Image (tube, coloured by chain):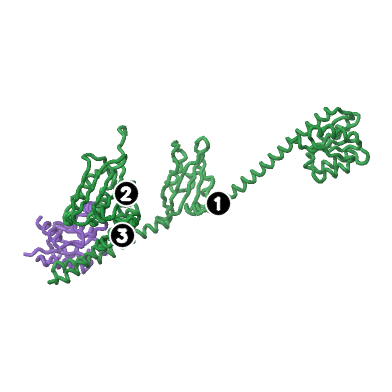
Chain colours: A purple, B green
Amino acid sequence: MAKKILIVDDDPDLVEAVTMILESKKYDVAAAYGGIEGLQKAKTEKPDLIVLDVMMPDKDGYTVCKELKSDPHLGKIPVLLLTAVVSKISTTRYTQQMGMETEADDYIDKPVEPEVLVKRIEALLAK
Amino acid sequence: MPNQANILVIDDEQIMRDGCSRILSKDGWSIICAENGNQGLEEIKGRPEQMDVILLDLMMPGMSGMEVLDHIRTFDPNLLVIVITGYATVESAVEAMKKGAYDFIPKPFTPDQLRIVVRRALERRTLQKETEFLRREREKSLRDIATEKSKIKTIINCMGDGVLVCDRDSCIVLSNPAASRMLKAPETCLLGNYLNQCNLPQDLSHTIEESLQTKDMSHTSVSQELSVGEPGEIFLRAHTAPVRNDIGEIMGSVTVLQDISHLKELDKMKSEFIAMVTHELRAPIAAVEQQLTVILNKMAGEVTEKQEQLLSRAKERTRGLLDLIKDLLDLSKIEAGKMVQYKEPLCLQEVIQRVVDLMRSEAENKKLDLQFSSPPKISLIHADRNSMEGIFTNLISNAIKYTPEGGKVWVHLGEEGGFVKANVSDTGIGIEKEDLPRIFDKFYRVKTKETRQIVGTGLGLSIVKSIVAAHLGSISVESEVGTGTTFTIFLPKESVPKLNE
């Protein structure tokens, strides 16, 4: 059975593009267009993995991730954080800080190269 | 002065006038003679200040000497009058002295007696003049000081910056309206009050007390930021310095306050603007690039070769925009001093090795020989790791970009004096002499036939320069067109802590 991935991002264009990448790799894809909707869909859709944007107006990715991880039913779902790298020079520091500040399982910069995204997802699902 | 003295002789006897003239002019004094009281007074009237000594005969027909003396006193009570008394009438001499005469000389007198009396009077006259001169000087100085005080007071009161002056007992002895406004305390609450009575921000009182008690002679001034009133209402920057006397004792303190609320406001706006740019500008470009990526990966159907070519170029352009945004944000952070806050002892050799390893595939793609050489042991520097990676990534990637296929790029690390020195050299196209001074400028890109195809934001080298500067280092460049370019960076070695520390 195909694994189901929930994409949470307030930018519908980005959701669509990522959906196309994942569908081409035969994943089942569900979409949510905001943090609150993302939390609801995580409960109803029971995805195998969540791709989560950071900057969202209603509830940001860090908060959503925290709430997911503290939920006894949803805590085990791997979360891949979609980040916008703010600075070219401080990439390493940024990722170091990200790793400390969030409970996400992995993070990836957007825009993403399809093969990179798929590789990361496969790695998380294999865990 | 005695030699230029004017001596007026008032006597009705020709023989006396001539005698006195003869005796006194020998000493170089100039003698004016008058044969009666009226004539004498006429001589004095126009120029009392020029009459140094007056010799006055008491017994004269017409106006008597006593009367003349009275008149002289009305011109100037300080005029020195020596009365000449006939037949040693002590009574009249005493009377004349009471009326203000300086001295007397009884007739008949010898030339020497006359000289002694006159000379004594002239000495007195000299002292009088000096005293008068000093009195005027003092008056003038006092006036100058008063004017100066009033001037300084006006300056201090008109200043936009607040001023607080404390004496060494922590009592406020001077404050200006700006200080009252900034500290939200009326003058009466400041002036004449002790620090602990006037409800100043605690940090400020503390700093002032400290500067009053400092034993350290090199203690000059302390700057601090303060918040006054409602949270976020007024932000002040305060500079406090002790005032010392000529032997270095602390006599008090001066605090200058600046209202930096508007700067804080601007800073906040800038941060918000940067956050806005980061998200509002980046997000749509990232989405566009994501869409292009999907199409280019043929996930939205087949793509013709021409379409693929166009879309690839479009993607390069969005990538360029995203790089530009990142560079701008880096630059604004470095300029705000927020970029290089994580300094640590760092081995530049490791940093460069890592960057060289990462860049190797890029160099190999262009068939370039990329080399790194360093002595086995190199001094540590005190630097921010990410910034250092940024510098060398930038310089090496530039070298690769601007070096034609088959060329060579090499990095050499060494030491020179108190500095670690790094060279990044290439056998690239080089930089024209007239472009060299400007290559570190923001957005400056050398435009030639060769560089047209090379993408870049024009910010890389100015970021590199800013980082080097933030590490108290220096960067320079040497280049020859068609031969190659070498960038040289000096970074100060980490200061080795002393053993007893």
Q: Disc 3: which chain?
A: B
Q: Secondary structure at mark 3?
A: loop
Across and down, in percent, residue B58 comes to 89, 35
Q: Amino acid at mark 2?
A: Ile
The residue to which callout 3 is attached is B445
| Real-space Cα separation, disc 3 to disc 2, in angstroms | 18 Å
| Real-space Cα separation, disc 3 to disc 1, in angstroms | 49 Å
The residue to which callout 2 is attached is B475
Q: Amino acid at mark 1?
A: Ile
Residue B316 as seen in the image, left or right of residue B217: left
Q: Residues within 10 Å of mark 3 (few under 14, many from 20)?
A: some
Q: Which mark is residue B293?
A: none
Q: Amino acid at mark 3?
A: Arg
Residue A35 as seen in the image, left or right of residue B119: left
Asked if A122 appears above or below B62 in the picture, the reply is: below
Q: Residue at x 36, y 58 (%)?
A: B268
Q: Secondary structure at mark 2?
A: strand
Q: In the depicted view, which residue is nearer to us: B291 or B447?
A: B447
Point out the tag, 3 or 1, that comes first from the N-terminus: 1
Residue B50 as seen in the image, left or right of residue B420: right
Asked if B419 appears above or below A127 in the picture, the reply is: above
Same subunit under labels 3 and 1?
A: yes
Q: Nearer the viewer, mark 1 or mark 2?
A: 2
Is there CB contact under 8 Å for labels 3 and 1?
no
Quarter residue A19 falls in: bottom left
Looking at the image, can residue A4 be seen? yes
Across and down, in percent, residue B192 comes to 54, 45
Q: In the depicted view, which residue is nearer to us: B283 or B258?
A: B283
The residue to which callout 1 is attached is B155
Point out the tag, 1 or 2, that comes first from the N-terminus: 1
Quarter residue B41 falls in: top right
Q: Quadrant of the C terminus of chain A?
A: bottom left
